[in-house]
């Protein structure tokens, strides 16, 4: 019956109550359409292999071993079955356990723009100013989030090691990187970077050929008077690394309606074909950005 249905449509979503034997049979019967078979995995663990929860990776691993696609159902389990104040940490923990068996979809075209708004907030912000004081939730307003697998070699790491990085600040090389709703430039939240020492904050991985010069603008607040910042662009599969810096005392123009300042930073084309990793570091060997409690644009 499943074979008849799959033949007549673009794909099929299997029930969660599959057995290991039936899974192998589904993979065999699917033939060259194996990627069109989506194996149901219930995060609540209802009659599902592995019991769901933080062991959902057990079921996903078996699905991937057979070359099948997966349909992960009800990841809202993290929010519904745990203290809400632990949601961010536990949600990161949940997805990091699945990461090694998920397909990575790199950003492939410009322009790339994000305020890191999570799609909800305690207030609404526009250009760094509060324009609404009521809590809100609208996931269609979510903007591009940090792609924390943008670290060389991360995909081959053990899931527990990945969570230590994602949990942020747990390994010496990485700083604390979280989404906060206490402040924002646009939307309901922004990216908060913290570290008591020199640290790296992996942000994105791009797969975009560069055929012209690249202009990068960063809007930020800095509270540490001794903070040094750089934006690093690294070519994938290459030893080449390029650093973008901008001194705070360069020519600046006020942003209308806000106390922030603005200036532009451009870099010449690095490569016409190679992919780029982008990360933020808390240490700069050349020039400093002056700290300020107001939003600054660089």
Image (cartoon, grey):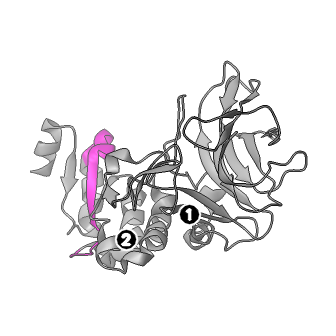
Q: Position of residue 188 (x, y in %)?
A: 43, 54
Chain-order first, disc 2 or disc 1: 2
Q: Which residues are magenta?
A: 30-47
Which residue position is annotated with label 1?
Answer: 178
Q: Which residue is mark 2?
A: 56
Neighbourhood count class around disc 2 (C-alpha, 10 Å): few under 14, some 14–19, many 20 upward: many
Residue 32 magenta-highlighted: yes
Location of the C terminus by quadrant is top right
Pick out the residue farthest to the right.
Answer: 286
Q: Nearer the viewer, residue 87 or 158?
A: 87
Magenta-span inclusion, residue 123: no
Whole-percent x, y for residue 140 in the image: 33, 45
As displayed, is residue 265 above or below residue 223? above
Residue 86, by quadrant, is: bottom left
Measured Cα–Cα span from mark 2 to mark 1: 24 Å
In the displayed structure, does residue 142 sit left or right of residue 213?
left
- Name above or below for residue 207 compared with residue 123: above
């Amino acid at each position: 019956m499943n074979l008849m249905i799959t033949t007549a449509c673009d794909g099929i979503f299997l029930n969660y109550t599959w057995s290991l034997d039936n899974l192998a049979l589904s993979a065999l019967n699917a033939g060259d359409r194996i990627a069109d078979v989506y194996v149901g995995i219930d995060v609540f663990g209802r009659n599902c292999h592995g019991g769901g929860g933080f062991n959902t990776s057990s079921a996903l691993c078996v699905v991937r071993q057979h070359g099948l696609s997966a349909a992960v159902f009800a990841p809202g389990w993290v929010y519904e079955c745990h203290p809400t104040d632990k949601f961010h940490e536990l949600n990161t923990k949940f997805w990091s356990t699945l990461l090694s068996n998920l397909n990575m979809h790199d950003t492939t075209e410009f322009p790339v723009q994000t305020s890191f708004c999570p799609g909800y907030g305690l207030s609404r912000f526009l250009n760094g100013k509060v324009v609404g004081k009521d809590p809100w939730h609208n996931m269609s307003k979510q903007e591009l989030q940090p792609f924390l697998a943008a670290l060389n070699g991360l995909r081959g790491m053990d899931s527990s090691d990945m969570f230590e990085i994602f949990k942020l600040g747990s390994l010496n090389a990485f700083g604390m990187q979280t989404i906060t709703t206490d402040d924002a430039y646009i939307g309901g939240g922004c990216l908060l970077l913290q570290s008591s020492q020199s640290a790296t904050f992996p942000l994105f991985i791009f797969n975009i050929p560069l055929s012209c010069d690249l202009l990068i603008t960063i809007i930020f607040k800095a509270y540490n008077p001794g903070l040094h910042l750089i934006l690093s662009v690294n070519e994938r599969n290459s030893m080449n690394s390029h650093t973008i810096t901008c001194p705070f005392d360069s020519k600046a123009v006020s942003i209308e309606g806000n106390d922030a300042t603005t200036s532009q930073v451009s870099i010449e084309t690095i490569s016409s074909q190679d992919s780029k990793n982008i990360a933020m570091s808390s240490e700069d060997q050349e020039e400093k950005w002056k700290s300020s409690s107001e939003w600054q644009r660089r």
